[in-house]
């Protein structure tokens, strides 16, 4: 019987992801709950991380290519994923397995404002969009942690 395609559970986009050595717990630092706000473009983020959680019903490995594309469809990063040596963790009470893929990029370039796409192409099959995130221009007030957005053509086009 052929392996089933893994199903996407969740994607978290943040500044950094770290793993605690003793407990294997993840620390998610600076999670984006809306848009990624930059002062100007091109922008360079010191760190940029993505956590992708998958579910497989038959312990199938996740293998393929993950791409981050700019609004103009330029491939910013392409990452080959092969978790065939790392099967999912399947608790006794669960009916399926869970896999987590963590991508940590350093000095990540955001060349333009707009909607970025996270694409996945399995080894067999067609590429599909997993998620998107929007990059807008604004100003972050460090003491309050609030964002003041500066209207830009990209924001106006998105109706914001």
Image (cartoon, rainbow, N blue to C red):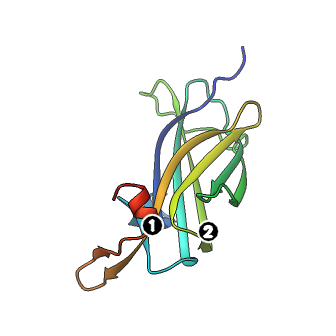
Quarter of the figure that contains the C terminus: bottom left
Residue placed most toward the observer, 32 or 159: 159
Residue closest to the far bottom: 143
Residue closest to the far top: 1
Q: Where is mark 2, residue-wise?
A: 105
User: Which quarter of the picture shows residue 83?
Assistant: top right
Q: Where is mark 1, residue-wise?
A: 153
Quarter of the figure that contains the N terminus: top right
Residue 53 pos. (x, y %): 51, 44
Residue 41 pos. (x, y %): 54, 77
Residue placed most toward the observer, 148 or 104: 148
Mark 1 neighbour class, 10 Å CA radius: few under 14, some 14 to 19, many 20 or more: few
| Drawn side of residue 1 relative to residue 69, left or right | right
Earlier in the chain: of badge 1 and badge 2, it is 2
In the image, what residue occupies the spot 59% across and 32% down? 6
Task: Determine whether the residue tagged by mark 2 lies in a helix, strand or loop.
Answer: strand
């Amino acid at each position: 019987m052929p392996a089933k395609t893994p199903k996407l559970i969740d994607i978290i986009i943040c500044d950094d992801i770290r793993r605690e050595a003793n407990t294997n717990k993840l620390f998610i630092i600076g999670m984006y709950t809306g848009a990624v706000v930059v002062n100007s473009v091109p922008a360079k983020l010191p760190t940029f991380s993505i956590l992708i959680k998958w579910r497989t019903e038959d312990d199938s490995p996740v293998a393929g290519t993950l791409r981050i594309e700019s609004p103009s469809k330029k491939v910013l990063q392409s990452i080959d994923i092969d978790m065939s040596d790392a099967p999912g963790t399947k608790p006794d009470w669960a009916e399926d397995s869970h896999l987590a893929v963590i991508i940590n990029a350093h000095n990540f370039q955001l060349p333009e404002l707009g909607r970025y796409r996270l694409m996945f192409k399995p080894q067999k099959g067609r590429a599909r969009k997993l998620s998107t995130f929007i990059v807008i221009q604004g100003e972050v007030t460090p003491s309050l942690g609030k964002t003041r957005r500066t209207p830009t053509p990209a924001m106006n086009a998105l109706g914001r």
